[in-house]
Image: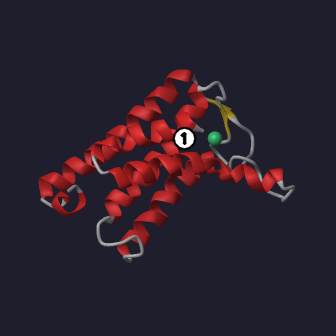
C-alpha cells in the first residue's frame, strides 16, 4: 500500500502541489477497493479497476466533474483527468513491478488476466509521470497554471 502511494505521489510531482500529490497517492491506493466486493461475496469480478476501460472512464468522469465545478475552482478538467489516469497507471505499475503481473486489462469484457512484463510496469510509471508533466507544461504555456500551481 505504501509503495502504491509513493508511486502515485511520484507521478503527481510535476504539479508541485501538495494537495494534488496527496490526492493521487491516496487514489493510487484506493484502486484496490475493487477487491472489496469480491471479498464480501458480491457477484463482482475482482480487480476491474485495473482494466483499460477503467483507465479510460475514470479520467473522463473526473474531467467531467472538474468541468462542472464539483472539484473546486483550482482543478481544470485536463488536470483532473491527467491525475486520475496517473493514479490508475501508477497503481497498476506497482502491481506489475511487485510481482503481480497478471492484470485483467480487458475487464469487464473478460476476467482472464494478461501477464504484463516487468518493464511495462516501469514504463507505466514513467508514462504516468510524463502525462502529468505534459499537462502542467501545457498549462504553463497557456498561462493557466498560475491558478493551479501556486
Ligand atoms: Zn492492485
Picture residue at 29% right of the left edge, 48% below the top = 15
Q: Residues within 10 Å of mark 1 (few under 14, many from 20)?
A: many
Q: Position of residue 103 (x, y in %)?
A: 66, 37
Q: Is residue 147 visible?
A: yes
Lateral position of residue 145 relative to residue 101, left or right: left
Quarter of the N terminus within the rendering: top right
Note whether residue 109 is visible. no
- Image quadrant in which you'd find residue 37: bottom right
Residue drawn where x is 65% and y is 46% of the image: 106
Q: How many marks?
A: 1
Which residue bears the numbered disc 1? 91
Location of residue 40 by image quarter: bottom right
In the image as oriented, which residue stretches furthest toward the right? 41
Q: Nearer the viewer, residue 131 or 19?
A: 19
Q: Position of residue 4 (x, y in %)?
A: 54, 38
Horizontally, is 149 left or right of 75 in the view? Answer: left
- Residue drawn at (27%, 46%), measured in percent from left and top? 16
Query: Any atom of ligand 1 within 8 Å of the CB at mark 1?
Result: yes
* Nearer to me, 104 or 79: 79
Q: Foreground residue, 6 or 102?
A: 6
Could you tell me which secondary element the residue under label 1 belongs to? helix
The colouring scheme, among rainbow, by chain, secondary structure or one colour, is secondary structure
Pick the front one: 18 or 82: 18
Instruction: Identify the residue at image location x=73%, y=49%.
Output: 35
Q: Is residue 119 above or below residue 103?
A: above
Q: Position of residue 136 (x, y in %)?
A: 24, 50
- Residue 27 point in image, percent of width and height: 52, 51
Which part of the image, by quadrant, shows the C terminus? bottom left
Left or right of 28, for residue 22:
left
**Where on the image, by quarter, is ligand 1?**
top right
Amino acid at each position: 500500500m505504501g509503495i502504491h502511494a509513493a508511486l502515485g505521489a511520484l507521478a503527481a510531482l510535476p504539479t508541485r502541489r501538495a494537495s494534488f500529490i496527496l490526492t493521487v497517492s491516496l487514489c493510487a491506493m484506493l484502486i484496490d477497493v475493487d477487491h472489496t466486493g469480491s471479498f464480501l461475496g458480491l457477484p463482482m469480478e475482482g480487480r476491474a479497476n485495473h482494466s483499460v476501460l477503467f483507465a479510460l472512464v475514470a479520467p473522463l468522469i473526473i474531467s467531467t466533474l472538474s468541468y462542472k465545478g464539483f472539484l473546486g475552482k483550482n482543478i481544470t478538467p485536463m488536470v483532473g483527468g491527467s491525475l486520475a489516469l496517473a493514479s490508475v497507471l501508477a497503481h497498476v505499475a506497482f502491481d506489475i513491478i511487485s510481482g503481480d503481473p497478471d492484470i485483467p486489462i480487458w475487464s469487464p469484457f473478460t476476467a482472464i488476466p494478461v501477464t504484463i512484463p516487468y518493464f511495462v510496469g516501469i514504463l507505466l510509471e514513467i508514462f504516468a509521470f510524463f502525462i502529468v508533466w505534459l499537462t502542467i507544461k501545457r498549462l504553463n504555456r497557456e498561462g493557466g497554471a498560475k491558478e493551479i500551481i501556486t
